[in-house]
Amino acid sequence: MASIVQKPSDLDFPESSQDIAQTKKSSKKSPQTKISVCDVMKNNTSSIIKKMEFQVPAYLQQYTDLYTAYLHSFDQIFGTCYIAEKEFFDKLEIDQNTLKSFDNFSKAFRDIIASQIDTSTQFLNTYVKMRISTIDSFDRYAQVMMRIYANMLSQFNSTFENKW
């Protein structure tokens, strides 16, 4: 899978407050270039979206690390209990048939939980694909609507050009 993550240096973010001040000074000294509301909105929105995109891998890695630590903690608890309780239960001399039945029940329960985890993963996969498909459909709809809007603005401008 190709990585689409950009490096921070690829983005248009000032590094520090000094850079922001320098940018403000240089923009005052440079000749005034004509910009539009659309330029401002598009550039600033794109900049924020790129910043958010750049943060996704770090966010996912942090959540993964947290969840892994949580799972390892439970695994260690059961490992510690095994060591502490093994001698105690061995001295009770529980009937082997009872232990085999308990083992079979425990394995069946384990298999049910594993199946539920697989089902949950498949559901999430399908859910994400459906959401992406919905976003793609919305994008296509928005593009059609923006073309209609652009045509309407063009007609509006041409109507008023003829009257002025």
Image: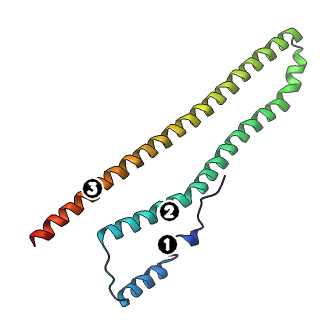
Q: Which residue is mark 3?
A: 149
Give the spatial CA distance, label 2 vs label 1. Answer: 9 Å
Give the spatial CA distance, label 3 vs label 1. Answer: 30 Å
- The residue depicted at 87 percent of the width and 16 percent of the height is 92
Say whether disc 2 or disc 1 marks the residue closer to the N-terminus. 1
Q: Which image quadrant for residue 71? A: top right
* Amino acid type indicated by mark 3: Tyr
Disc 3 secondary structure class:
helix
Disc 1 secondary structure class:
loop
95 in relation to 69, above or below: above
Position of residue 42 in the picture relative to residue 88 (left or right): left
Q: Position of residue 72 (x, y in %)?
A: 73, 41
Residue lying farthest to the front in this orientation: 162
Q: How is the image coloured?
A: rainbow
Q: Which residue is mark 2?
A: 50
Residue 130, numbered label? none
82 in relation to 136, above or below: above
Say whether disc 3 or disc 2 marks the residue closer to the N-terminus. 2
111 in relation to 73, above or below: above
* Amino acid type indicated by mark 2: Lys
